[in-house]
Every structure is written in C-alpha cells, then in structure tokens.
Image (spheres, rainbow, N blue to C red):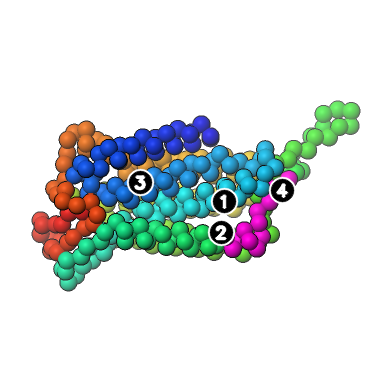
Amino acid sequence: MTSLASTGICIAVAFFVFNVMYRQNSYVKLSSPNINNVLLLGNVLCYCTVFFRTASTESDVICKSRLVCFSLGFTVTFGALFSKTWRVYRIFTNKKLLKRTIKDYQLLAIIGVFVGIVLVLLIIWEYMGPHRIVTKYLSKEVYMIGNDAEVIPFVRVCQSEYSDYFEWPLYVVEGGLLTFGAFLAWETRKVKIQALNDSHEIGVCIYNVVILSAVGLTLSLLLKDQEVLMYGITAGFLIIGTFLTQAVIFIPKIQAVRNKVSGTDGRTATGINTGFNPSSTHQGGE
C-alpha cells in the first residue's frame, strides 16, 4: 500500500510540474490551474494517510497525523472539485443573463471555508479527547504453539474517548459536501462548453468520490473489529479514488497539449466572465 501511495505522490508531483510549465497554454488556463494545484495538494495529503499505520508504532503523533492528513486531504480535494462545479452551476443558472465574474480567489475562499470548519472540529476534538495509541488483542485469533504456550496477536489502534461525539459531525460535514457536490454535478451534466473545458471530468470525479466514500464508510463501520482487513480496504479505496481523480482531471489536458489543442479564449486565468444566452455560441473566457 505504501508503495502504491508513493507512486501516486510521484504522479501528483509530475502533474503539478506539467500544470506549472503549461499554465500559459490556453487550454490549461481555462481549467483554473490554481485550483488544480490545490486539488493536487489534497491528493498528496490523502496519499500520506496511507503511511500512517498505527499497528506497529507506539507514537500518539502517528494517530493525530493520520486523522489530520485524511480529513484535510479529503476536504481540500473534494472542496476543489466542488468549487469548480459550483462555478459552472452559478454561470448556467444565470436566468437574467447578467455578466457574472467568478474568480479563482472566490473558489479558494469556498475551499477555505470547508477546511476551516474541519480544522475547528479537529482542534476541539483533540483538545477535549486526544487520540491515543491503544493495544487491541485479537482474541478470536488465539492459537497454541506447544508447551502450554498461547499466542495472542495484537494490533495498535487510535482511540479517543470522544470519538462518538466528533466522528459523526465530521461525517455530516463531509457527507453534506459530497451530497451537494453530486447534486451540482448532476445539474451541470449536460454542460460541454470549451470555456469550462473540464466540467464533465469534474462531474465524473465527484460521482467516483461519492461512490467510493459511501462504500468505504460502510465497510469501515462493518469491519470496525477487524483492524488489519479494514486498513487494507480503506487504504485501497483511498489510493484508487485519489488516483482516478487526478488522472481524470489531468490526462485529458496532457493529451490536449500534446495534440496542440487550444482553448477558444486565453484572455485571463483568474475567472469567468459571462453575459451570454446559454443557447447561443458566445461564451466568456476564464
């Protein structure tokens, strides 16, 4: 799992280098490279979660690091996808056909709000009931090795006495973000405008995250007493979901640059200015 996560981080770094090198390419500009860099940051944090396995450590810092990396990584990654989908939704529900400019700093502010909410929950959680390493004996796997010697395998897990009070608020925040993001992706599923050249890919990523998160959460609750198996499943889902997200967003851009495809307008990469009838062919550039 750590090898796969390391490979994913290397790929994320490669995508970041591509994003920086070709940020002036009109096709790349149209997809908000600044927000894409934030998305890659979230991807790296998600991958880092895989490294913080508590089974063979006695350090409480590992517990805290794993929780922070996963919570912030997920929020940053999905927040970036959500903010870009929100922008498309706002533009194409502009019934009064007024000019509307949505800049990158507004999208960053949306991501910042979600990150701030999660950070407040984590800080209060750690203040009231810090996570500690607890040794958990696997009583169902006890076996004899002769001479009346009994072997009892164990794993070390993270626990907090206030987990029940803070896990569900986090699930509600992240679940609300997923649900609303899926709704916006569904509402904008038919938008295929060059000035919003990755809107369809963003929708695919959101559906992917929603499905994997729902299945992963369900399995983690059902397998709560099987720590080793749960680690393998959750780490696998995390790696697959993160890799698919960055691949779906960046591979089409790499192909477009390689094939020398350019956007319709490269005037600015800071926002979208629209004042058009959605049924017409005129659209603003980002």
Q: In the image as oriented, which residue stretches furthest toward the right?
A: 147
Vertical placement of residue 273 versus 142, above or below: below
Give the residue number, with chain letter if any, for mark 3. Answer: 37
Q: Can I make out residue 226 in this image?
A: no
Q: Is disc 3 surrounded by few (<14), some (14 to 19) or many (20+) residues within 10 Å? A: many
- Please tell me which residue lies in front, 177 or 129: 129
Give me the disc on residue 134.
4
For badge 3, the amino acid type reads Asn
Q: Is residue 131 magenta?
A: yes
Name the secondary structure under disc 4.
Answer: strand
- In space, the residues marked 1 and 4 are separated at their CA atoms by 15 Å
**Is residue 269 shown left or right of residue 59?**
left
For badge 2, the amino acid type reads Leu
Q: Choose top left, top right, bottom left or bottom right for residue 183.
A: bottom left
Tell whether label 1 touches label 2 (CB within 8 Å).
Answer: yes
Question: In front of the other: label 3 or label 1?
Answer: 3
Give the residue number, with chain letter if any, for mark 2. Answer: 122
**Image location of residue 84, percent across then percent down:** 31, 55
Give the residue number, with chain letter if any, for mark 1. Answer: 67
Q: Is residue 74 magenta?
A: no
Tell whether label 4 touches label 2 (CB within 8 Å).
Answer: no
